[in-house]
Amino acid sequence: MPTLTRRAAAAVAAALAALTTACAPGSETDRPQDKAPAAVNTDIAKAGNVTLTVWDQEVQGGQREQIEKLNAQFQAKYPNIKINRVSRSFTDLQKTLRLALSGDSPPDVVEANQGYASMAQFVKAGMLLPLDSYDQVYGWKKRYPKGLMDLNSVTKDGKLIGSGNLYGVSLNGEIVGLYYNKEKLSKLGIQPPKTWAEFEQALGTAKGKGEVPIAFGNLEKLPAMQLYGVIQDQNTDKEAVRKLVFGSGGAWTDAPNVAAAQKLADWSKQGYFTKDANAVKWDDTPVNFAKGQGVFMFGGTWWAPDLSEKMKDKVGFMLPPPAQAGAPSATMGGESLPWSITSKSKHPDVAAAYINFITSPEAMDVSVETGNLPVLAAPSKQPDATLLKEVSAAWAELSKNDGTTPYLDYATPTFADAFGGPLQELVAGKVTPQQAMEKAQADYTAFQAKK
């Protein structure tokens, strides 16, 4: 999950500058070294009394319940370990984590977002510990598909994500999909769309009958990037999106990408979004949707537990409908923020045992029990709420078809502002699609030249 807000930009820039000066990344001696697997202590019960400081962004209903339950189970198994949990919203974590990692006493375990803006920068600065030896001990790569492990892997110089050393392990799966209000669809006489064309027809019908077609809040700019990405996945091949985001081919000004921006602009001009969408907070979007504002809403599966609780069977979830009925869908997603060990942690073996515990098969059962989407199949639990069953089925379908595309803000360290800003202007009608994509390409080109 992405991104940085404009308010955080100055602080982040300052932190990066300090970080770059203090850590002087570049030489092997600056970077933390992985210990030999034989030197890893897995007998945590004999580790002595340890306080493990963990920073997470699991603050929403089901996510909070999930991590609280897992932490309690870990401490019950190891009474000698006390977890000092520091929880922050996703946005607040992005603002503060860099400064925390650059201090003398950083947390032991953190959720470090994938991509060039966060994990790659931390790795380059030597702030995270490579986990490859711990992987050999705990066998994470044997349990996780290679594609998911690649998302949490970075070369030591921070120049390439998707390869290099392993720096994190994730607990939950994620999809940016399409929520819909079943009651409103029924009143409008519309069936859940099976094709992209049917979906666009439904938007027009909803608008014509006085409904808000798409609940959309874009104050933080990230939502427009996610919505653009969903549209982009309808306009171009998933491999083209992957190559573009990871810097191995294509341009943001390519015709299909400009066409996606044009579609976003068209929807805004046609009044398909929540009024004054650029002034509505992202976190308020599902709240407003649950109150009946919007027929459809694009959003992540991390919203599903709360929506299921508030809307019960009135809400449905599906993958973005494909061009042809029954064809495989593609959409952004992958896995939740990975759990990483900081390079200055005084208890890396305990931290690794903790990460292994909260990503174990038993933890996947806890994920289901608390209404979340486990990244791996839970061994004995199945969701019981209708919405959560639909989310689980969508995840299985997307995984089967290899339909996941990466979050777009992975593309460069500054892409959240460099592309999110122009998209915000595009929604407001202040720039053309071509101008928005040229701004994105300028940032992308500059970053690729420096890699």
Image (spheres, helix red, strand yellow):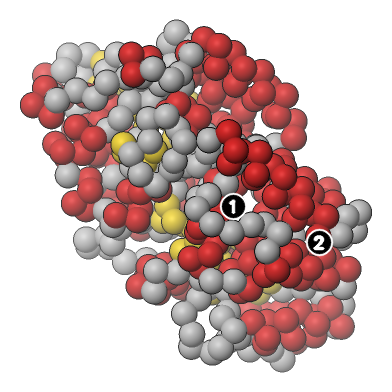
Nearest to the eye among marks 1 and 2: give it.
2
Q: Mark 1 points at which residue?
A: 408
Crowding at mark 1 (Cα within 10 Å: few <14, some 14-19, many 20+): many
> Among all residues in the image, which is located at the extreme left?
38
The answer to whether any part of residue 367 appears in the image is: no
Give left or right: position of 36 versus 279: left
> Among all residues in the image, which is located at the extreme right?
430
Evaluate if marks 1 and 2 touch, with contact meaning CB atoms under 8 Å apart: no
* Percent coordinates x, y for residue 68 in the rendering: 39, 38
Q: Which image quarter: residue 236?
A: bottom right
- Please give the name of the residue rendered at 22% of the width and 45% of the height, measured from the top-left corner: 140
Q: How far apart are marks 1 and 2 (CA)?
A: 17 Å
The answer to whether any part of residue 408 appears in the image is: yes
Q: Which image quarter: residue 84?
A: top left
- Please give the name of the residue rendered at 33% of the width and 39% of the height, measured from the top-left corner: 164
* Percent coordinates x, y for residue 202 in the rendering: 73, 84
Q: As shown in the figure, which amino acid type bears the numbered disc 1? A: Leu
- Please give the name of the residue rendered at 70% of the width and 37% of the height, measured from the top-left corner: 5
Q: Is mark 1 on a helix, strand or loop?
A: helix
Q: Name the residue under label 2.
A: 433
Residue toward you, 130 or 185: 130
Give left or right: position of 270 versus 233: right
Asked if 240 appears above or below 435 in the picture, the reply is: below
* Percent coordinates x, y for residue 366 in the rendering: 31, 51
Q: As shown in the figure, which amino acid type bears the numbered disc 2? A: Pro
Residue toward you, 10 or 368: 10
Give left or right: position of 74 versus 15: left
- Please give the name of the residue rendered at 60% of the width and 38% of the height, measured from the top-left corner: 449
* Percent coordinates x, y for residue 441 in the rendering: 70, 50
